[in-house]
Image (cartoon, helix red, strand yellow):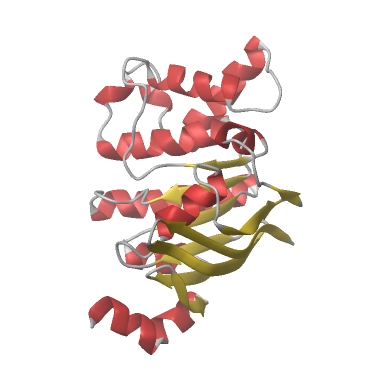
Amino acid sequence: MTFLDIKGVSKRFGGLMALNDVSLQVNKGEIFGLMGANGAGKTTLFSVIAGHVPPTTGEVVFDGMRLAGLSPNRICQLGLCRTFQIVRPFAGLSVAENLRVAALYGRSRKLSGPEVAQVVDDALEAVDLADRRDLDAGQLTLSGQKRLEIARALATGAQLLMLDEVMAGLNPTEVSTMLETLSSLRAARNLTFVIVEHVIGALMTLSDRILVLDHGETIAFGTPEEIGRNERVAEVYFG
């Protein structure tokens, strides 16, 4: 079942066409990868989907609802949440307090005190941060802060998570652990993911299907195996 439907989305910033007629469909429970070199339009597409910038043309439909004109917080409350490449936790709050904020303000309905506590506990456990719940979020390692980004998205009740370079800057062991975390989250919670990632091996391992952008245009789409054999993709990445 199509969960996220991007229909002919273009985005122009003055004379720059950042996205040009991009279409894609993400199925419920799928891990969908977005590839492309720097400047390809991946983060712009994320921003359009999440409501941070409006498309110049085209539309975004999430779970049957058109998102045109909706604010980012309203889109989040509908169950679609994004993370950012540059992590920005509430550094003066503890890890658990960061999740309380997400649970209290990111959901479409208000939760009781015990419900918030349960949401926080579940999200901490899901990303293996339970033992650091009382630590100041600013004291987490980069890997820990990336996990906190995911946990905050989980605490909003999101069913579709858009992860922007969640493995950037991690060492190979941390990347491997993150792969395990994301795979287990999908299996345990039936979550849907759209992932932008420059760690190509990780993206190939995780994704069911991948769309490749180059200068705002789609140049390839298919399974990881098909993308790996695509000559145009190899040319863009390796010259």
Residue shown at 69% from the left, 28% from the top = 108
Task: Give 57 or 236, whichever is nearer the viewer.
Answer: 57
Q: Position of residue 196 (x, y in %)?
A: 42, 57
Residue shown at 34% from the left, 67% from the top = 200
Q: Is residue 112 left or right of residue 235?
A: right
Most distant residue in the front direction: 15
Asked if 201 appears above or below 165 in the picture, the reply is: below
Quadrant occupied by the N terminus:
bottom right
Q: Position of residue 122 (x, y in %)?
A: 56, 29
Asked if 55 appears above or below 82 in the picture, the reply is: below
Quadrant occupied by the C terminus:
bottom left
Residue 143 in view in this figure: yes
Residue shown at 37% from the left, 85% from the top = 232
Asked if 69 appears above or below 179 in the picture, the reply is: above
Task: Give 230 or 125, whichever is nearer the viewer.
Answer: 230
Residue 185 in view in this figure: no
Asked if 112 appears above or below 45 in the picture, the reply is: above
